[in-house]
């Protein structure tokens, strides 16, 4: 038993020792693995640190390249700006030189006019002296009373003075006309050659296409309910006749007619034509058109390069697409005037952008005449004042209808552009009665003058040809007569564009061979 106990103790001691030895060996192996992992971690950290350094170096290099590129672009932009500034300075110097030359020409013309005025005063003094001598001579020789002699001589002197004045006026008018025509032709040529406009003729009706004539019955509806609803809601006349696959929308208001046409097209495409659906589609189309006219106005001012306009004015510009005057679309006319005015103002040394602004707003009142009482001139001026537009714009609105004097180069360019756009062949059409009345007034004014034998209005009323008696009217007096007729036509007749007054004086000798 004792031996057995000793064996057990010995076995336990051996097992304990073995366990202790195993534990020590295992601990040593674990320490080795830990060192290995530590070395691997240190190697990875070193690699990461090296990669970070490389990335930092690359970022620094890229930053330097970006800075160099930015500096290069800055220098190029600076060089371009300096070059542009130099070119602008040269242009300004050239403009100043041209203005100095024109000023010198004006000064010389002023001196010439003053000399001519002195000459006229001298002629007048000579006439007065001759008149006094003639009065005494007539009284002594003819035995006439002083009043009778005075009346006779005054009449003679008046006739002679009229001839002399007419001769002088004609000579200087010709000189001024030649110079003015040369400059005006150059400016108009520049304006018209640099702007070409499309022409669209507006009518009072629009046609809606139908794929099937059976749709006409559905549009009319039971007992005419649908067509009555359409005409009541949209404010237009709908004409349904025997024309195949078409119905006609009629209205003098182009905006309402366009909305009605679009509403009908959507109803036909939808197929559900009934009063409730008509009202729903109509309201939807009205909202679309309000957005469209604002978009049209924005496109116009973007095309012209005009900035700073109030949104309400932009909306009114878009609404001009649905207005017409003498058959000419108001928006197309406005674009023509704005572009022509900009070119002409630039040629005359004015502000092209301001001229375009005045041109695009000169007929803005036409967008309001269907909704408010008053002329489009007064309405346009009022709305532009409300939104603090430039005084030049207000002056152009009034001046292009002769209600104010032209105060600036820009206003003059707008008035000229308006006349060009209105007078362009085919741009406008008129009612026959108004045309006949205008032509009759022109011929009546010309025929009422002394010495006129015949007067004819030709070239669609844009020219009046006046035949005068050679015995009663001299060549110089013919020039004065043309001016008198032109002035009276301007004051008494309303017309678009210009009217040419052509006075013809000729003498004929007739003999028969027998």
Image (spheres, rainbow, N blue to C red):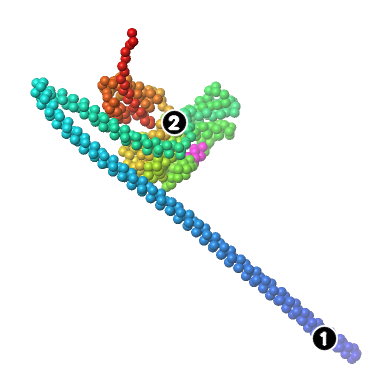
Q: Residue furthest bottom?
A: 2
State left or right for residue 197 relative to residue 43: left
Q: Residue furthest top?
A: 514
Q: Residue at point 34% right, 27% down?
A: 501
Helix, strand or loop for disc 2: loop
Which SS does the magenta portion mostly show? helix
Q: Which residue is labeled 2 in the image?
A: 427
Q: In the picture shown, does residue 437 fall above or below 112?
A: above
For marks 1 and 2, the one nearer the N-term is: 1
Q: State which region is magenta.
A: 285-293
Q: Residue 130: give x, y in percent of width and height.
A: 15, 29
Q: Residue at point 45% right, 45% down?
A: 305
Q: Quadrant of residue 43?
A: bottom right
Q: Nearer the viewer, mark 1 or mark 2?
A: 2
Q: Residue 63: give x, y in percent of width and height.
A: 56, 64
Neighbor class of circle 2 (other Cα within 10 Å; few <14, some 14-19, many 20+) is some
Q: In the picture shown, does residue 86 fall above or below 2?
A: above
Q: In the picture shown, does residue 322 fall above or below 452?
A: below
Q: Which residue is labeled 1 in the image?
A: 17
Helix, strand or loop for disc 1: helix
Instruction: Give whichever of 141, 487 is nearer the camera.
Output: 141
């Amino acid at each position: 038993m004792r031996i057995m106990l000793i064996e057990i103790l010995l076995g336990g001691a051996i097992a304990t020792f073995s366990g202790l030895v195993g534990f020590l060996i295992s601990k040593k192996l674990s320490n080795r693995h830990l060192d290995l992992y530590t070395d691997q971690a240190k190697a990875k950290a070193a690699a990461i640190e090296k990669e970070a350094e490389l990335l930092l170096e690359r970022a620094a290099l890229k930053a330097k390249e970006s800075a160099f590129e930015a500096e290069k672009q800055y220098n190029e932009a600076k060089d371009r700006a300096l070059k542009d500034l130099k070119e602008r300075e040269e242009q300004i110097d050239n403009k100043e030189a041209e203005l100095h030359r024109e000023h010198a020409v004006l000064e010389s013309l002023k001196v010439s006019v003053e000399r001519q005025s002195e000459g006229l005063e001298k002629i007048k003094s000579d006439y007065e002296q001759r008149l006094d001598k003639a009065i005494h001579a007539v009284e002594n020789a003819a035995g006439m009373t002083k009043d009778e002699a005075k009346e006779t001589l005054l009449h003679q002197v008046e006739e002679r003075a009229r001839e002399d004045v007419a001769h002088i006026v004609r000579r200087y008018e010709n000189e001024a006309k030649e110079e003015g025509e040369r400059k005006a032709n150059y400016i108009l040529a520049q304006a018209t050659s640099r702007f070409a406009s499309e022409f669209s003729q507006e009518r009072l009706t629009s046609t809606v296409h139908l794929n099937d004539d059976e749709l006409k019955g559905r549009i009319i509806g039971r007992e005419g309910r649908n067509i009555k609803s359409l005409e009541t809601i949209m404010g237009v006349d709908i004409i349904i006749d025997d024309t195949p696959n078409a119905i006609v929308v009629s209205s003098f208001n182009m905006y309402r007619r366009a909305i009605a046409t679009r509403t009908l097209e959507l109803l036909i495409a939808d197929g559900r034509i009934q009063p409730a659906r008509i009202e729903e589609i109509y309201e939807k189309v009205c909202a679309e058109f309000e957005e469209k006219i604002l978009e049209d106005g924005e496109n116009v001012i973007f095309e012209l390069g005009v900035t700073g306009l109030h949104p309400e004015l932009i909306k009114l510009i878009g609404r001009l697409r649905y207005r017409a005057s003498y058959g000419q679309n108001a928006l197309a006319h406005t674009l023509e005037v704005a572009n022509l005015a900009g070119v002409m103002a630039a040629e005359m040394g004015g502000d092209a952008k301001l001229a375009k602004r005045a041109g695009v707003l000169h007929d803005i009142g036409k967008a309001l005449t269907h909704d408010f009482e008053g002329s489009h001139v007064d309405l346009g001026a009022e709305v532009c004042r409300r939104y603090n537009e430039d005084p030049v714009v207000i002056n152009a609105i009034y001046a292009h209808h002769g209600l104010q004097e032209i105060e600036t180069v820009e206003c003059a360019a707008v008035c000229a552009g308006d006349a060009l756009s209105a007078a362009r062949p085919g741009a406008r059409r008129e009612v026959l009665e108004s045309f006949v009345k205008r032509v009759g007034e022109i011929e009546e004014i010309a025929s009422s003058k002394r010495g006129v034998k015949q007067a004819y209005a030709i070239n669609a009323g844009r020219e009046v040809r006046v035949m005068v008696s050679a015995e009663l009217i001299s060549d110089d007096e013919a020039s004065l007569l043309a001016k008198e007729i032109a002035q009276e036509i301007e004051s008494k007749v309303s017309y678009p564009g210009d009217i040419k007054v052509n006075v013809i004086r000729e003498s004929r000798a007739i003999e028969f061979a027998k």
